[in-house]
């Protein structure tokens, strides 16, 4: 099997070329103790600092063609995908599904950037880092979650986690002073593209909420949230409640009683007990 030569490295220090010299041992002859892909969904994926790869066997570099042919059971292809994963949605899940199924025997590591890095390079998030970490742990395609992932991948990070390939959509991602933060990964032959899901993104979801702000503000006031919790002024709260009252008056007497009980939550002094459908 071709292996990466030690002197063939890019400027970033990531090996990028293959030699034709066969290794002294084949992959089948080397005993690997790498973590295996999850076979059960009864528990969330572990964090990397709880189950880091301690395998002492040499971690041979693979070509994409070799990985697609399949590897020994004890030597899964270690695929890495990273992101912010704010308001985790189906687009995120589909990207991770693609990364997980790139090769017959894959172990998917997912890096999630911290709040500090994300706020610095991209902007504020809706969910904090702990919530985003937990969301990824409960995705069925994920085998391991790396907290506080780096914004730009370094040779040291790739080596530490024994990463074979990096999966991400192929659109150049300009950030942190770079035209494409994955450029050096592509040059090293370690990049495998995935496809974005059109029509769904965190930005799209936030846009919908901002666009329909009045609707969601009224809804949450009706559900018992306070004006302070919603960061709504007293005047706006009164306005939302008046609109809700007008909506109630316009309803037919035959309207389901569930709606009336829920709507009364926005009236001062009324009980906030949960409604029961009759």
Image: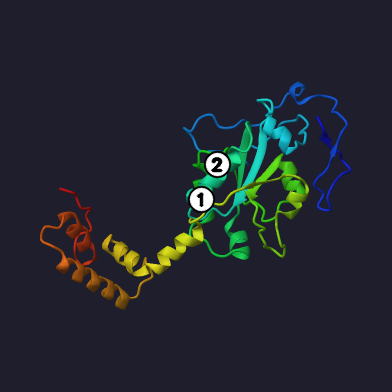
Within 10 Å of the Cα at label 2, are there few (<14), some (14-19), or many (20+) other Cα atoms? some
Q: Position of residue 213 (x, y in %)?
A: 37, 68
Q: Position of residue 78 (x, y in %)?
A: 67, 37
Most distant residue in the left direction? 253
Q: Residue at x 70, y 59 (%)?
A: 180
Q: Quadrant of residue 31?
A: top right
Where on the picture, by quarter, is residue 109? top right
The residue singled out by tag 1 in the image is 91
Between 11 and 64, the one lying in front of the other is 64
Nearer to the camera, 29 or 124: 29
Residue 135 point in image, percent of width and height: 49, 47
Q: Quadrant of the N terminus?
A: top right
Q: Earlier in the sequence, mark 2 or mark 1?
A: 1
Work out how far the residue at label 2 is from the one at label 1, CA to CA, in angstroms: 10 Å
| Tag of residue 268 | none
Tags 2 and 1 in contact by the CB under 8 Å rule? no
Above or below 227: residue 115: above
Q: Is residue 163 visible?
A: no
The tag on residue 97 is: 2
Which one is in front, 101 or 133? Answer: 101
Q: Is residue 193 visible?
A: yes
Classify residue 257 as left or right of residue 56.
left
262 over 4 or under it: above or below? below
**Number of marks in picture:** 2
Coordinates of residue 46 in the picture (x, y in percent): 56, 38
Q: Secondary structure at mark 1?
A: helix
């Amino acid at each position: 099997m071709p292996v990466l030569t030690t002197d063939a490295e890019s400027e970033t220090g990531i090996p990028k070329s293959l030699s034709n010299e066969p290794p002294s041992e084949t992959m089948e002859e080397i005993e690997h103790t790498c973590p295996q892909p999850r076979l059960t969904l009864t528990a969330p994926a572990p964090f990397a600092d709880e189950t880091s790869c301690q395998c002492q066997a040499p971690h041979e570099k693979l070509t994409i063609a070799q990985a697609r042919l399949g590897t020994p059971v004890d030597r899964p292809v270690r695929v890495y995908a990273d992101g912010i994963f704010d308001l985790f949605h189906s687009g995120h899940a589909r990207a991770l599904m693609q990364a997980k199924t790139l090769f017959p025997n894959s172990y998917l590591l997912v890096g999630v950037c911290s709040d500090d890095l994300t706020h610095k390079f991209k902007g504020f998030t809706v969910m904090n880092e702990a919530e985003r970490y937990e969301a990824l742990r409960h995705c069925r395609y994920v085998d391991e979650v790396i907290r506080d992932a780096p914004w730009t991948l370094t040779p040291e990070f790739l080596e530490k986690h024994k990463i074979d390939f990096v999966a991400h959509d192929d659109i150049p991602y300009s950030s942190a002073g770079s035209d494409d933060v994955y450029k050096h990964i592509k040059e090293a032959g370690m990049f495998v593209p995935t496809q974005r899901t059109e029509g769904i993104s965190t930005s799209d979801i936030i846009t919908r909420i901002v666009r329909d702000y009045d609707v969601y503000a009224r809804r949450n006031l009706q559900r018992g949230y306070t004006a302070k919790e919603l960061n709504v002024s007293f005047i706006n709260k009164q306005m939302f409640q008046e609109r809700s009252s007008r909506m109630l008056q316009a309803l037919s007497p035959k309207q389901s009683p569930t709606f009336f009980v829920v709507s009364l939550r926005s009236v001062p002094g009324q009980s906030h007990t949960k409604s029961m459908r009759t």
